[in-house]
Amino acid sequence: MSRSKGFLKPCFAVAGIAAALAAVLGGIFAGGTGAWAAPTGVALVALGFAGSVWAVAAAEKIDLRLTLVMALVTYAVKLMIVFAALAAVKSHAPEALTPFAYGIIGGALAWLGTQAVWAYKAKIPYIELSDRA
């Protein structure tokens, strides 16, 4: 996992670009509220994905068999956090709900697309290579 965490830098870079784009588009389509709500959704997604990577990497250091369990737990926790954030936005700033939700969707697509491109181009062996040749 530590070798494959190299996708975090490009994913964060693309998430930053997506947040800037979300701020512009949110401002155009929803005014000042959209200008902060849409990039906040992108940031929530980026932090959620990065948190999952770090949690799974930490679990791998303990025991490789814990990685699937940790991935499933972090997925469930992320969903609860996203739904709680959506509920909080809906109750406190209902006009921000739509741009916030679009920011979440856009951030997820940007992050996953970047990670997929990185994985496609990465030279990661799919088997453990021993030191013996």
Image: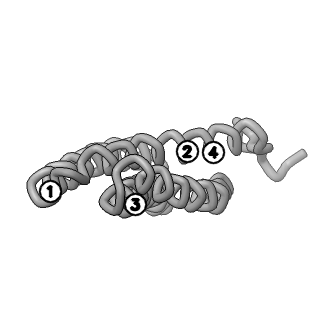
**Nearer the viewer's eye, disc 3 or disc 2?**
3
**Nearer the viewer's eye, disc 3 or disc 1?**
3
Q: Is residue 120 above or below residue 36?
A: above
First in sequence: mark 1 vs mark 2: 1
Q: CA distance from mark 1 to mark 2?
A: 24 Å
First in sequence: mark 3 vs mark 1: 3
**Nearer the viewer's eye, disc 3 or disc 4?**
3
Q: Is residue 68 visible?
A: yes
Measuring from the top left, give residue 76's x and y in whole percent.
Answer: 26, 44
First in sequence: mark 4 vs mark 1: 1
Question: Is residue 8 left or right of 117 when viewed as pictured?
Answer: left
Q: Which residue is mark 1?
A: 88
Q: CA distance from mark 2 to mark 4?
A: 6 Å
Q: Secondary structure at mark 4?
A: helix
Q: Which residue is mark 3?
A: 35
Q: CA distance from mark 4 to mark 1?
A: 29 Å
- Kind of residue sitting beneath label 3: Ala
Residue drawn at (63%, 45%) of the image: 114
- Kind of residue sitting beneath label 4: Thr
Q: Which residue is mark 2?
A: 110
Question: Is residue 8 left or right of 31 when viewed as pictured?
Answer: right
Residue closest to the eye, 115 or 70: 115
Q: Which mark is residue 114?
A: 4
**Nearer the viewer's eye, disc 2 or disc 4?**
2
How many residues crowd around disc 3 within 10 Å: few (fewer than 14), some, or many (20 or more)? many
